[in-house]
Amino acid sequence: MFRKTKLLSFIFILLFIISSSPGCTYAQTQENPDEEQNLVTAARQMRQSNNVQLNFSNLEISKFLRFMSELLNENIVVDPAVGGKVSVVSPKSISLREAREVMLSVLEMNNLSIQNMGGYSKVLPASSGPTLNNTVIKGDRSIAPGESLTVQVVPLRHVKAGYIMEPLRSAVPDINITPLENGNAVLLTGKASALNRSVSVIRALDAQDSVRSIKAFTLTHANPKIVESQLNVMSKDTSSKLSGILAVGDERTRRVVLIGSNQALLESERILKILDVPSRAENFHVYRLKNADAKVVAEQMNSILATAAKLSPDPKGAIPSSVVPDLPTNSLVFTASHEQFGSLKEILVQLDIQPKQVLLRGLIAEVNLNKLNSAGIDWAAWGGGITGDAVIAGNVQMGSATVPGEIIDLYDKLITTEEIYTNPVTGNTYTTTNTEGKALIYTYVKMLNKYDAINVLSMPRLMCTDNLPSHLQVGQVIPQIKGTLTDTTNPRSVQNTYEYKDVGLILSVTPHVRSGNLVALEIEQRVEDLLTTMGSPTPVTSKREVKTNVLVANGDTIIIGGLIREAEKVLKHRVPFFSYIPLIGNLFKSSEKQREKVDLMILLTPYILEDPKAASRMTHSIISDGQQLSPAEIGTLMKNQEDYEKSIKNEGVTKDMLDPNKTLSGDSQEEKKDDWKSRYNELVKDMEAKEKDKEK
């Protein structure tokens, strides 16, 4: 007895707490283990107060239906195929009738339907049947909005069902119409919104005035629903010629069905011609770009239009202009008036120009400073000398002897070219001097290669578009452990997650062609080497990186260097057999530690290509050139080699160092320098012949 009294007291306190909360709001909580029981309790309280507030987030649909069953006091049977989760938020209180409409909307959004079977309702997938309401409404009264299919019987007082069937189907396509009782009534089936529109049409047709006609108009520009609203407002004026007219618009077929007297229909037709015209502010224009990128130009044009709108706002009610890119066709779609589009078209002509291209010829190499010093070449003097117009400066050493000053003067003459320009108006003659150091640079690289002091990492040939980034990567991708997950119950179960890192040579360049035949280069160069073995769980890398912005003339070469890496080597020397004898083996082996300094050297030469023809000629030149040098560079090298050999006799430089075939091409020393001359002449003739054939 005491236990029953205690239990009743607990239930009374619980009901008091729930009833004291405003609106009896129920919010789904994840912490409450008795979630379903709480749902049932809250539903009962809301049903008693007829004050419902819903707040569900990702609630299983079975629990939602259990809640609604208790709230509406209805038996609901759920099909086994029904599943999913629902979210409902109702900050304002609603009635039980409105709560049922919310349930129907939730079921419809989840492709479910509910069918009233009499003593119970059945929830099943929408593919098994639509939501049905067994209640049949009689009369021509309007019904409350809802999602379920409703049946309404509308009696006819003045006309037969056959008179209204066709116009009713035309005005309300989504309704099912069946004639009843020898044509004195119609059976309508559909949703509440469609039924209410059908009843309005029936009221207009079923009038004592039998001289009412029906006519459908197809619109070209105007919105049918807007025209419907405008005509129905004008028909309420009893003094208007449109008095008594009923308009029903159908957006799907772009038609407006009019019901009324012949005089009203004629006046409506005149009004429709006035309303059905294109709006000047909503004209669409398409502009196809020839060269520029549609996405980039669209962003620029929208920025221009936004600024113009701030400076000169459109009249009230005007639709602002906008630009949308169509990427597949590289076109721009404008929403603007004809006057605005004419102004924008002038801007587009200036923006839609063919972008220039820039060919970057480069050399990325590592120079071993230890081997360079052993060969007798002062890298610091050479590196500092290849700058500006001087090209060679300071004391340059080769072996034990120095290069005489006249050779430096000779190089300066060979790399200097003069161009004579005559003014056609005044007749005055001007001379301009240009200096190029490319031939000397490539000669120097070959000499470094001879002494094994240089490791060429890459000789990129990048064809870039003006103002667009280009990327070159040579290397590998290594995995790195990002995290480790261990099961506490099974320590041997370890799961690793990895991230991947790029190592090797990475070159990123963005060229910007400036006036005056100049090129601004945004350069980002990174060389990252793997120091540990590939299978190491924590790989260690070394990175050398350069980020810079330079301005260089067309065809000139820039050098970026100074990133020195220091490495240590251990060299072991052994005497075969004896070094492996125990105890005395150490007497026959030795080890030596060497520290090497390696400098990263980057040489880049940009060439401005005005059009695709220039790009094609440059590509042909590179393909035809076995040494990857232009004919001018080959000729300069050949002449430099001959004059250099004549001028440094008895200066301590060996003949092997001066052999062009050994220094530049790597061929045997026995080949004649005449082969180099003949090769150059044949190359020039071949290129000239191909150019003539191409012109023909």
Image (cartoon, grey):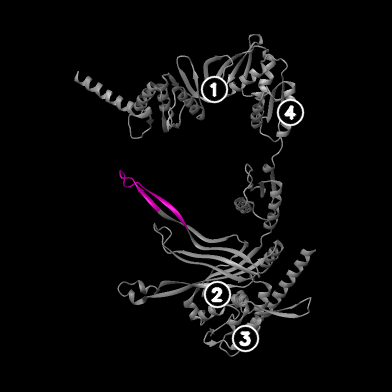
Mark 3 or mark 4, earlier in chain: 4
Residue 557, x across and y down, in percent:
60, 73
Residue 81 visible at all = no
Residue occupied by mark 3? 409
Residue at 48 percent across and 16 percent down: it is: 117
Q: Which span is picked out in magenta?
A: 482-501
Q: Nearer the viewer, residue 322 or 330?
A: 322
Image coordinates for residue 75, horizontal then vertical, percent = 42, 18
The 10 Å Cα crowd at callout 3, few under 14, some 14 to 19, many 20 or more, is few
Return the disc, 3 or 1, that comes first in the chain's sequence.
1
Numbered mark located on residue 130 in the image: 1
- In the picture, measured across the screen, residue 32 lies left or right of residue 292, that is left
Instruction: Examine the rendered structure and indicate whether residue 106 appears above or below residue 355.
Output: above
Q: Nearer the viewer, mark 1 or mark 4?
A: 4
Q: Main SS type for the magenta part?
A: strand
Please tell me which of labels 2 and 3 falls first in the chain. Answer: 3
Front-most of 595 and 283? 283
Q: x and y percent of residue 475 in the render?
A: 51, 61
User: Amino acid under label 4?
Assistant: Glu
* Residue at the disc numbered 2: 449
- Is residue 415 visible in the rendered image? The answer is yes
Q: CA distance from mark 3 to mark 1?
A: 97 Å
- Left or right side of 300 for 397: left
Out of 197 and 104, give the one closest to the viewer. Answer: 197
Tell me the CA gap for discs 2 and 4.
91 Å
Q: Amino acid at mark 2?
A: Asn
Q: Quadrant of the N terminus?
A: top left
Disc 4, SS:
helix
Residue 551 sits in quarter = bottom right
Reading the image, the residue beneath label 4 is 269
Separation of disc 2 and disc 1 at Cα? 83 Å
